[in-house]
Each structure stands twice: as C-alpha cells, then as structure tokens.
Amino acid sequence: MFTGIVQALARIDRVQDLPGLRKLRLAFPPGFCQDLAIGASVATDGVCLTVTALHGQDQAEFDIMQQTLVVTTLGSYAVGAQVNVERAAKEGAEIGGHPLSGHVDFVAKIAQIQQTENNTVLRFSVPDHAMRYLFAKGYIAVNGASLTIAQIHRQECWFEVWLIPETLRQTVFSAKKIGDAVNIEIERQTQVIVDTVNLILDDKLEAMVAAVLQQKGVMS
C-alpha cells in the first residue's frame, strides 16, 4: 500500500527491452534506498513495481511485464526521464494523501494547463467509462500523487486538479505539457460504492421489467 505522497523524483538511468519484458533502472536521491531490499515495492509514477536488483547505494532495477506496459505510461519512457516515486507504507504510517494500491486503472492525457497567480490548474481528458467514478472534491491518484478533484465535466469527459507550488516542486507535474499521458488510479472506496449501487439498480430494473412483462403475458 502507498499513501499518495510523492517522496522523491527518480531518474531513469537505464532501459532494457526484452521479449515481453522491460527492465528499468532508476537512480534515486541520496538516502532513498536506505534499507531497500530486493522484493520491496516502489510506486513509480503510480505503478507498483518490485525491486529485482540493487546497484550501489542509490540505484535499483525493476522488471515490468508486458501487460503493465500496455495499461500504463511506463512503456513510453526513455533514459533521462524523471518519475514520481514512493516506497511502500510501513504499518502505522501516516496517510497524508489517501490509500493507493499502485494498480493503474487507465491512462489520461493532459488537455489544458492554466496558470493562476498562485496555482497551476491541470485538466485531464479521461475515457467515458471512468467518469462514473469521478466526483468533485473526491480523491484521485495521478502518477502516484494523491490529489483532490476540483471540477469535472461528465459530458466532455474531463476533470481538473489545482496544484500548489510545493506540489509542483516535489513532483513531475511541473515538466508536463498538453498531450502528455499520466497514470490514473481511482479511489477504491468510491469505486466499490459506485459499482455496488449500479449493481443494485440493475437488479431492481431487471426485476421491474420482468414483472411488467409477466403482467402483459409476454413471459411466464
């Protein structure tokens, strides 16, 4: 589990593409890898990756399977790119953002960037099927960062977040441009509630239709 609070920016130091697999070596800031062991989890732009090798004091390697490359942005990154990173939360850790699994639900694209006097507003275009899980003032994870949705537009399929200068300083968002893709993880409690309500409504609607058809003698 992760908290959605980005701990550092890491640099992609090496990329090796193999059949059905990509090996990614990340260079971390000093101290980030203290007590990091093979098998540990590190959220990389919101994707939970497992350490497969350690190199020196501040580098680690990860294996990324083909399915992960398909459903996230990690397949498009090149050497030198920066990514948000967070180590797995320890028991009793303060949840400064909201609980994340590190399992990306879909990729969104930056549709608009607006600079205000003290904030940056990012608008993301999302797939139509995902809009049911998005609500103003609700949580969303973008590249592993826990953010609050400021505004949504269900017909046009977008949502906006407001970023303070400190968030820009600590994350990759300051370097993002219109058209760039990001990893999105839906807030799980919201997803469960929405899916449960929809299931109940579908069952009730099915029962109502069946009752009407029986009354009309269409079915027995």
Image (tube, helix red, strand yellow):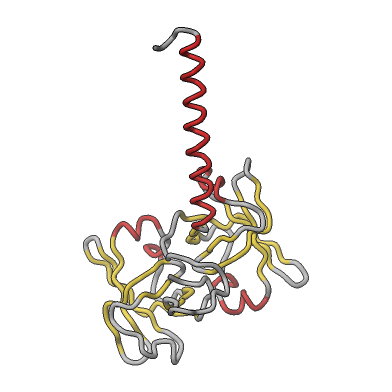
Q: Position of residue 21 (x, y in %)?
A: 26, 64
Q: Position of residue 92 (x, y in %)?
A: 48, 79
The residue lying at 57 percent from left, 79 percent from top is: 170
Horizontal arrangement in the rendering, residue 97 relative to residue 78 (left or right): right
Q: Position of residue 136 (x, y in %)?
A: 66, 54
For this rendering, which residue is in front, 131 or 182? 131
Residue sitting at the far left: 19
In the image, residue 111 above or below residue 22 = above
Q: Position of residue 50 (x, y in %)?
A: 32, 73
The residue lying at 47 percent from left, 66 percent from top is: 100
Q: How many marks?
A: 0
The residue lying at 39 percent from left, 55 percent from top is: 71
For this rendering, which residue is in front, 214 or 17? 214
The image quadrant where one finds the C terminus is: top left
Horizontal arrangement in the rendering, residue 117 relative to residue 101 (left or right): right
Q: Quadrant of residue 150?
A: bottom right
